[in-house]
Amino acid sequence: MEFHPLNEKDIKQLKFMVSPDRLSTGESNLDLHSRDMSRHPACRPEVVIWPVNRREVSQILGYANQNTIPVTAWGAGTSLEGNAIPLRRGIVLNFSRMNQILDIREADFQADVEPGVIYQDLNHKLRHSGLFFPPDPGTQATVGGMIANNASGTRTVRYGSTKNHVLRLVVVLADGEVVEIGNRAPKTSSGYDLVHLFVGSEGMLGLVVEATVRLAGIAEEFASAVGTFPSVQSAGKAVFEIMRSGVDPAALELLAQECIDLINREQDMGLNVLPTLFMEFHGPIQRQLSDN
Ligand SMILES: Cc1cc2nc3c(=O)[nH]c(=O)nc-3n(C[C@H](O)[C@H](O)[C@H](O)COP(=O)(O)OP(=O)(O)OC[C@H]3O[C@@H](n4cnc5c(N)ncnc54)[C@H](O)[C@@H]3O)c2cc1C
């Protein structure tokens, strides 16, 4: 598709849609949105816009669609894939100002959030409720970026990835239409599973403007263990044995000796430079370990 570079008329039209302090063509803002955390080459957008509600997102996408202007969504730019880089330039929509936690329904194990909520902020807010949002990529990622990337992390072994924690989405399609997909019922099997079509679609099918996420209970007890192995192969075999034994780890991370060496150099931790398995266990630990 032939994309159209933005001209003055486009910028003027976009300025009618959002307040002027939320649109920037400044060099430093364009630079900040030209690369994520990957090694892929940078590419600057032509304008960065910070929408604050779904109406603005819908208007901007509708206008961009009619005028063949490319749009790339931006959460926190922590992706390691290069998919937040606006390769065709055009508009970057930065969701950081759509960062409201709209509702927490503890008894339903659910929260409704805007896409720019940082998942650690959600967990901070939930800390006294005994609940948490389990996917944990270990960095300042937004829920919208996690949904688009189907983010996982060290705890995926027990809790699954982001796709296991999304029940409902409000999405703006490329032409500006706003659609609601999925629902808040924890168990439902009727109809097409459109939610899981959108989770992992990297902002290509539409932009998430609201999500209902599924929460989990914070375990009563936590324990951790570290094991070193003579080779990555023997560590891999140990992972298989751990999973088969039913011990049910909540987090597993295997680091090769090169990574351990790097950690020692950066953090001066004095770890043995060998393939190392870091493990975390949640729940009634005593029983879990003695039953196995
Ligand atoms: C140190 C480090 C460790 C990491 N570890 C992991 C890990 O263990 N597992 C893992 O999966 N990832 C990991 N990541 C990668 C990254 O943190 C995740 O992929 C995260 O989900 C990206 O979120 P973000 O908010 O930064 O999104 P961005 O990087 O801003 O965007 C990612 C994608 O989402 C799209 N997007 C953003 N917002 C929306 C929206 N509202 N609607 C539609 N599309 C949108 C963007 O266009 C882009 O395609 C790690 C990154 C770092 C830096």
Image (tube, helix red, strand yellow):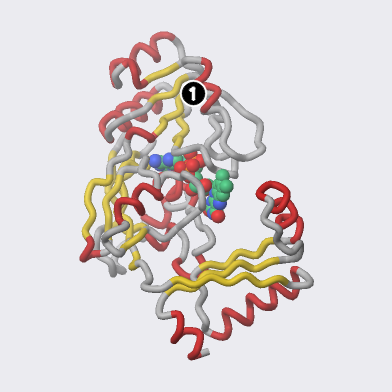
Placement of 249 over or under 143, stated as above or below: below
Going by the numbered disc 1, the residue's amino acid type is Gly
Q: Identify the residue shown where x is 67% and y is 78%.
A: 238
Residue where numbered disc 1 is placed: 90
Q: Is residue 206 visible?
A: no
Q: Nearer the viewer, residue 114 or 209?
A: 114
Question: Looking at this rendering, what residue extends furthest in the top direction?
Answer: 8
Q: Secondary structure at mark 1?
A: loop
Q: Nearer the viewer, residue 181 or 292?
A: 292
Q: Position of residue 194 (x, y in %)?
A: 37, 55
Q: Position of residue 248 (x, y in %)?
A: 50, 78
Residue 214 falls left or right of residue 235:
left
Residue 194 falls left or right of residue 81:
left
Q: Position of residue 167 (x, y in %)?
A: 32, 59
Q: Nearer the viewer, residue 181 or 164?
A: 164
Q: Identify the residue shown where x is 30% and y is 32%.
A: 58
